[in-house]
């Protein structure tokens, strides 16, 4: 959830105090850690507005260095709440939540494990058919990537989190780069992973290497050469362009790739220990978080041995599967939500004896969130009073 803050300075006749204004995706919270004078509120029309009436002896002054550029019309689907500090005694504290603006909330999308469609991962075994990829004797890259991909898919399907794994090819078929990306788009993939096991000039280069699409120049000569090799095999004529400032999938690709890197760091050999990037066409033609992974290099003797070792291949696939599952669990709100569900209510009146845990579970909130929103103490028991959910 994106959260932004700024400080509002309010001047009263007897001095001034600072209020912290916290903006989230759902609301705007104003927290003032000092007693405030008694006030009353009422609404008026023409235009519609809420008036906060203060005593006559209160002097309110606008400070010239306040933020005057923020446009409220951009957040007019939120409601605003003033939270008073529960640790202080106030002249007026019966109503701790003052709703300044409220608009009927539209039906929204939200994530629910019981209702959410399985996360979709498209696994792309590099090369195939007449395109052997890299070779060393009878060893062909196209066979290595297909074998590993099938094992990875089986491992993903057995994870506790609902996931749907799709292969761009299930046999020794010649699939164009355009078709591979089309498969990912048609299946509304949440992730796209292209798998390879290339040959490189330096035979000492070995280990797992992870690549994302570069924003400009390749991160290294190694990454650039590898991308040039992969791109020349099946070039796509149509030129693609990406605006990386607007395209959040680039950042998601980096985050996912980093999670793979960290998950593998303690268990397998890594090529460079960092994320590489280059202009891979197979990654450039999609608006889907994606990466290209070299599971090893056929040109290296140690990697060749490992890539033909059944126990190692199963271990590597299981490790990948676990990393992917954990990534989705930790970042599920970035991905496709279940839509057309009723929006979460602003508040509820829980029955006596209901616990915060019960409510948090039902409305997909944490207990800490409920306590923060409602200025609650340590108790987990709820009375029959109004409880805010947002």
Image (spheres, grey):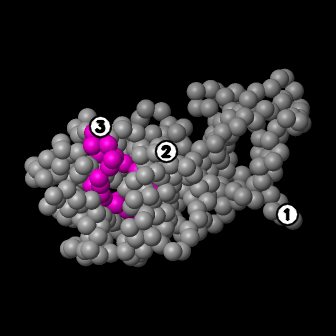
User: For the magenta stretch, what is the residue range?
Assistant: 187-213
Q: Which residue is mark 1?
A: 47
* Left or right of 50, for residue 56: right
* Left or right of 285, for residue 306: left
Q: Which mark is residue 265?
A: 3
Provide the secondary structure element on which disc 3 rests.
Answer: loop
Question: In the image, what residue occupies the spot 89% across and 36% down?
Answer: 64
**How far across and how far down the image is residue 354, in percent?**
37, 48
Front disc: 3 or 2: 2
Circle 3: is it few (<14), some (14-19), or many (20+) Cα within 10 Å?
some
**How far across and how far down the image is residue 205, in percent?**
30, 41
Give the vertical position of 362 relative to 85 (above or below): below
Of residues 282 and 11, the one nearer the viewer is: 282
Question: In the image, what residue occupies the spot 57% across and 59% down?
Answer: 247
Question: In the image, what residue occupies the spot 52% across and 66% down?
Answer: 108
Circle 2: is it few (<14), some (14-19), or many (20+) Cα within 10 Å?
some
Give the CA distance from mark 3 to mark 2. Answer: 20 Å
Q: Which residue is mark 2?
A: 219
């Amino acid at each position: 959830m994106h959260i932004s803050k700024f400080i509002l300075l309010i001047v009263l006749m007897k001095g001034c105090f600072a209020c912290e204004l916290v903006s989230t995706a759902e609301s705007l919270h104003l927290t003032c850690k000092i007693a405030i004078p008694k006030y009353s509120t009422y609404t008026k029309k023409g235009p519609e507005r809420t008036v906060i009436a203060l005593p006559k002896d209160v002097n309110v002054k606008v400070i010239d260095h306040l933020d005057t550029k923020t446009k409220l019309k951009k957040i007019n689907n939120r409601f605003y709440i003033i939270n008073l500090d529960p640790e202080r005694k106030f002249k007026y504290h019966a109503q701790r939540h003052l709703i300044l603006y409220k608009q009927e909330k539209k039906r929204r999308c939200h994530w629910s494990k019981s209702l959410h469609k399985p996360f979709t991962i498209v696994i792309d075994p590099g090369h195939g058919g007449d395109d052997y990829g890299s070779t060393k004797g009878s060893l062909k890259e196209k066979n290595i990537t297909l074998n590993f991909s099938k094992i990875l898919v089986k491992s993903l399907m057995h994870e506790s989190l609902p996931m749907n794994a799709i292969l761009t090819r299930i046999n020794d078929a010649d699939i164009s780069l355009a078709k591979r990306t089309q498969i990912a788009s048609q299946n509304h993939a949440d992730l796209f992973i292209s798998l390879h096991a290339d040959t490189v000039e330096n035979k000492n280069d070995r280990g797992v290497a992870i690549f994302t699409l570069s924003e400009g120049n390749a991160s290294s000569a190694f990454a650039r050469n590898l991308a040039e090799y992969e791109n020349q095999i099946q070039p796509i004529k149509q030129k693609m362009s990406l605006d990386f400032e607007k395209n959040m999938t680039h950042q998601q690709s980096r985050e996912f790739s980093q999670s793979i890197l960290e998950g593998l760091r303690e268990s397998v050999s890594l090529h460079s220990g960092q994320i590489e990037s280059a202009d891979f066409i197979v990654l450039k033609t999609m608006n889907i978080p994606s990466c290209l992974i070299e599971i090893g290099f056929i040109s290296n003797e140690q990697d060749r041995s490992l890539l033909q070792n059944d126990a190692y291949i199963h271990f590597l696939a299981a490790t990948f599967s676990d990393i992917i599952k954990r990534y989705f669990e930790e970042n599920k709100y970035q991905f496709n939500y279940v839509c057309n569900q009723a929006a979460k209510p602003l508040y509820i009146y829980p029955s006596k004896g209901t616990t915060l845990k019960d409510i948090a579970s039902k409305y997909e909130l944490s207990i800490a969130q409920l306590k923060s929103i409602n200025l609650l103490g340590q108790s987990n028991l709820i009375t029959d009073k109004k409880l805010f959910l947002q």
